Amino acid sequence: MTDLVTVAELGGAFAAIGGTAYLKHAHPAAYWSTVGLPVSVARLVGSYSSTMDACGLTVEPPRWRALAVRATTRREVRPVPPRRGIIRPTSTGLRMRLRLAPGQEPADLAASAERLRHAWGVHAVYVRDIKPGVVELRLVGFDVLRKVRMPRRAGADLLRVPVALREDATAFVRDYRAVPHELVLGATLSGKSMYLRNLIAGLAAQPVVLVGIDCKRGVELSPFAARLSALATDPEQAAELLPVLVKEMEDRYDLIKARQGTAPDTPNELITSDIWGLPEDERPSPVVLFVDEVAELFLVATRKEEERRDEMVTHLIRLAQLGRAAGIYLEVCGQRFGAELGKGATMLRAQLTGRVSHRVNDEASAKMALGDIAPEAVSAACSIPAERPGLAVAGDTSGGWSRIRTPYISLADAAATCRGTAHLAPDVAALSPFKPYVPPAPAAKPAEPLGHPRPVVE
């Protein structure tokens, strides 16, 4: 009987250990909520002062405090760490605010983030400046990019689309009002198309004009044709569509001039306002132009194609330079994008404020996307593994960057979202000739009767 009890006890212990290991590997969020969170809180509370002292994040106390301690307790006066606020658990980690001691700055904590991560046994530690003298520590308990789950409150709004998850468990929001134009690079099977799907599916439910240029015969954007107001599937159609968009931009500038009383001959470059200053009943709908595989617009084989290429690139540059005020935004995607594409490529890239680099085939491609705005992010983009599609490095001209990953959405689901929101597409008369053909939905088959009637025999 004693042997059976011993075996049961050992078996229960091994089962608990095995279950915990399985939970940590297969369901990290559940493991964090049940095991990781209490353990990390205990470590943080028990070792906060000693950890801060070991990381060099303590300062000498004020003189009055030192005199008070000596007078009342006669203890040795020790350096004091930043004052800790309330610990707020989350589904992915912990958050707490720290009031910095005199002489400290947020960069001091950011430099010790890796040490704090190991000391408290969490996946990562991030520092965010709240206000002068106050910072927020965000502790992430596990790798949130391994299985992406978007936050419930992601901040969706007009021209704001939560399209990916950051490595600090916050939503990466594509905000066209703040970052008008963006360049998205990525090799084949890197997740670039998934990023585009999430973006289109998010914009489909908004009163936004969606326009596509897909020179791969439309294989990427044709599934979303029901929601697109215009679609060009080859360079010839793109060469006809871009002048129409430029004319639409000029018409919107004329509308702004008329509303503000600006002289009609004022150059567009001197108009500092935008369509958002117009009354809502007069404001034209914003336009988002998706350009997939932009290199196809630059490649030429004959003299005639070269002239067409120069004209298209000129139109794209004008849209990038002046389109923001007119409510026209660009989303340019490709595998490579640099000076070797031809005249105007570097000028166009300079106008694309946002940069997203998925896995690339060479370092030069990462430098094209991030080298001119965040040089330290180039190595991060080059180290993206092939077994993690959708993982990318996002940066902007402010120099900041972060790792992000888009959630999985099937092509069928994204296409169904576009079909269900087709009625929300604003009507733009100038784009009507470029409206893509959408085949009608197949008619439902009539239900077969459960039984066949038999004639009545008298």
Image (spheres, rainbow, N blue to C red):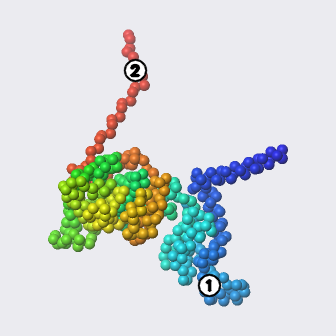
306 left or right, relative to 186: left
Q: Position of residue 241 (x, y in %)?
A: 23, 55
Query: Is 98 situated above or below 422?
Result: below
The front one of 214 and 329 is 214
**Residue placed at 31% from the left, 49% from the top?**
216
Above or below for 245 versus 130:
above
Note whether 158 is above or below 272 in the view shown.
above
Residue 46 placement (x, y as % from top left): 67, 70
- Residue 56 placed where, x, y %? 60, 78
Give the quadrant of residue 68. bottom right
Question: In the drawing, what numbered circle is on residue 452?
Answer: 2
- Residue designated by label 1: 61
Coordinates of residue 448 in the picture (x, y in percent): 39, 27
Residue sitting at x 60%, y 58%: 32
Q: Nearer the viewer, residue 443 or 363?
A: 363
Give the amino acid at mark 1.
Answer: Pro
Q: Say what amino acid the circle numbered 2 marks.
A: His
Mark 2, Cα crowd under 10 Å, few <14 / some 14-19 / many 20+, is: few
Cα separation between marks 1 and 2: 94 Å
Residue 334, located in which quarter of the rendered image? bottom left
> Which image quadrant: the N terminus?
top right
Q: Give the left or right position of residue 211, taking residue 191 as reference.
A: left
- Contact (CB < 8 A) between labels 1 and 2? no
In primary-sequence order, the first of circles 1 and 2 is: 1
